[in-house]
Amino acid sequence: MHKIYHKFVILFLLMLLGATGYASVNNHENSSIYQHPLSAKNITQFNQVQTEQAKFYHITGDFVQTRKMALLSKPLVSTGTFQLIKAKGLIWQQKKPFASKLVVTDDKIEQSIENNPPFVLTAKQQPIVFAFTRVFLSIFKGNTQAIKEYFNIYFTGDTKHWQLALVPKGSPLNKAIKSVEVTGGRYADSIVIHEAKGNDMEIKFSKVVVK
């Protein structure tokens, strides 16, 4: 279940913010973004950024994902491509160190590794996971109210350059994720995920094309 939550938080950010650096920090409280909770002072700029992101209906690009784990001396690095079609869902295709494919739609999450048969997770099997997934898909479509139900939001910047942080308000997300930090301009440049167990993951995007 932890792996599923980890995946759909990543998917949510792609859906919310489009997608191409940012340095990971071990203690999120040391980052200045947390001095800017969403309030009357920055809500206008936040809404402007969300409005711009919601205009995209087709996003493609490459990703480099680096995961730093406390028990490993070297980070785990994976690379691949992604495609997000607003009306259909997300395809997250890893190429290295091994091939895998993750497809997310409103009612199904399907993952395949190498040439093995795909593993399919449905809304009936995991209603909580899909409750969040539907929220995330609705956010990508321009509905930002849903995010406020599950996250405390921190924001600074404008449509040219912005930084966003999300901190789960409670269970079950806070059992897997401590915080998520995103930076961007026209679309998101990078995502940093601080896991509850002390591990960090950074995802950087390149060759991004939006329509």
Image: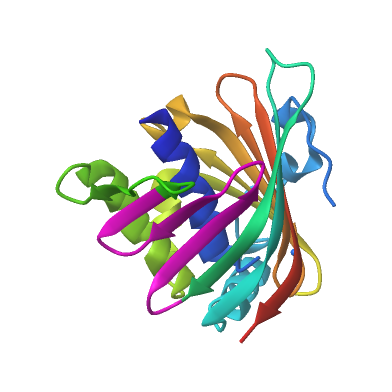
198 over 208 or under it: above or below:
above
The residue stretch that appears in magenta: 86-111
131 relative position to 3: left or right = left
Which residue reaches farthest front? 115
Residue at the (46%, 74%) spot, across then down: 142
- In the image, residue 144 lies at what x, y percent? 46, 65
Residue 94 in the image: state x and y as whole percent: 59, 52
Q: Foreground residue, 171 or 89?
A: 89
Q: Quadrant of residue 51?
A: bottom right
Is 151 left, or right, of 210 in this rendering? left
In the displayed structure image, the side of residue 133 where residue 197 appears, left or right? right
Q: Magenta span has 100? A: yes
Tell me where residue 131 appears, x and y as whole percent: 27, 51
In depth, the one of 171 and 119 nearer the eye is 119
**Please, is residue 47 above or below residue 156 in the view?**
below
Question: Is residue 157 in sight in this rendering?
Answer: no
Residue positioned 58% across, 64% down in the render:
82
Q: Position of residue 156 (x, y in %)?
A: 74, 57
